[in-house]
Structure formats: C-alpha cells, structure tokens
Image (tube, grey):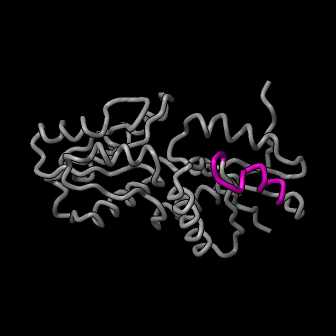
Amino acid sequence: MKPVLLVIAHGSRDPRHAATVHALVRRVRSLRPDVRVETGFLDFNIPSVQGVLESLAAEGVRDVVALPLLLTRAFHAKADIPAVLRDAPRQLRIRQAEVLGPSPLLLSALERRLYEAGLTPADKSSTGVVLASAGSTDPEAIAVIADIAREWRHTGWCAVRPAFASAALPRTEDAVRELRALGCATVAVAPYVLAPGFLPDRIARGAAEADVLAEVLGPAPEVARVLLRRYDAAAARGLLRLTVSA
C-alpha cells in the first residue's frame, strides 16, 4: 500500500481559504487515484491535523507522508508542523515532505495566472512583475522569494521585483511604483500565495496602481503536480520516525 498523503494547510477564518485547499486536493486526487489523500488544518478549520492522524491510526493505517501546503520553509514548516507530527499516535510512521517551493512548476503556474488575467507571452519584454508574497520573519524564506524573483526575471520579463504583505519590505504598492519608475510599459502583480485570505487581500489592495492583478495560485495544475512530486520524493525515503529534539 502507498503511504497516505496528508496535506497540511494553515487554515483561515476566511472561508475562501479552505475552499481553495479542498479544490487543490480534488485535483491531486484526480491526478493520482492510486493515492489516498487527506486534508488537515493547523488552525481555524476542521478537520485538525491531529484529528486526521488519530482517525488514520484507528483505521489501521501505518504509513503517512505529511506534506506542508507551504511555498517556503518558514516557521510553520520548521516548528509548528513537526511539533504536531511528534504528537501523532505512535503506530504511525510519518515522513514530512518538503514544502512546495521553489520549483520551476510554480513559476509556470504564476505565468498561467498572469496570462489568465490578460497578459500574453508577447507582453513579457515590456511588463514588469511584482512577485508578491505573504511575507515572513524567517530570513531564509525572504531570501528564497528574492532568489525566485531574480530567476524569473531571466525568462524574459522587463523586470521582476519581490514584495511582501507582512513582516518584510518592500510592500506591493512600493514595488509597483518602482517598476513604473524603471519605465516598464505594463506593471503586473503575481501573488505568490496558494489561497485567498487576509494577506492576499492586502496584496490586492497594494496592486491598485498596477495594470494587471493575477489570481492566487490555488488549484493550478502545476501546483498539484509539484505537490505530488514532493509526495513521491518523501515516500521513496526510508521510514524515519519523528522524534522530539533535546
């Protein structure tokens, strides 16, 4: 039997968040009907991660791949999720998969969203893009967003600038103005977030002076594919029980 894939989302008071997570999970199931996929939330929504793990153990499931539905390795991936998994029933053998980003597939998903919002490949050389992330206090996560922006610039855009909705600078509106000052004929904002919510709404407000605002990544097929790649990589690893660090 293949390990159960447990997709771990943060959760939100905004109902659009859970709806988007469930839509992504449905796409994942359609791509891999041979894999059982469950969803658990860290906060605000049900079922909780702990509740799903207890239910799986009660069914007799033994192998689980826990996949953080995150784009960078920040606090939730490094601390919150491992702490929850350490409290799982002892009969479960759990492997924590890597977060989704960075990945070339996610860049493809970002471009898909920009084209859906009205751009075309012919617009790339005259368009500056704001890569708008939720933000983090983790320097590693901030550095990853800056690296992605530099990499994406080399695919033909006029310019790409990172921006953050919280915890770090610049804000989306400041990056939009910078691209205008650089002389980009068109300025687009690409939210590097998975689901709607408080911070994505802040990104949207910051994009008021932009020409194009893309939708969040959501259940894009590229996101589902990278999720399954992370699952397969974790499933192929040896079974290592998570232990409490000293």
The x and y percentages for residue 229 are 58, 59
Residue drawn at x 53%, y 64% is: 224
For residue 238, above or below residue 73:
below
For residue 184, above or below residue 163:
below
For residue 28, above or below residue 84:
below
The x and y percentages for residue 188 are 23, 51
- 213 vs 5, left or right, is left
Q: Specify whether residue 52 is painted magenta.
A: yes
- 195 vs 245, left or right, is left
Please state which of residues 98 and 178 is positioned toward the viewer in this rendering. 178
- 96 vs 113, left or right, is right
Residue 131, by quadrant, is: top left
Where is the N terminus found, in terms of image quarters? Answer: bottom right
Where is the C terminus found, in terms of image quarters? Answer: top right
Residue drawn at x 82%, y 46% is: 88
The part of the chain drawn in magenta is 42-55
- 135 vs 65, left or right, is left
Please state which of residues 116 and 120 is positioned toward the viewer in this rendering. 116
Please state which of residues 37 and 48 is positioned toward the viewer in this rendering. 48
Residue drawn at x 40%, y 42% is: 133
Q: Is residue 161 visible?
A: yes
Residue drawn at x 74%, y 37% is: 83
Q: Is residue 67 visible?
A: no
The x and y percentages for residue 191 are 37, 50
Q: Specify whether residue 174 is painted magenta.
A: no
For residue 15, above or below residue 50:
below
The x and y percentages for residue 98 are 60, 47
Count of numbered labels shown in the rendering: 0
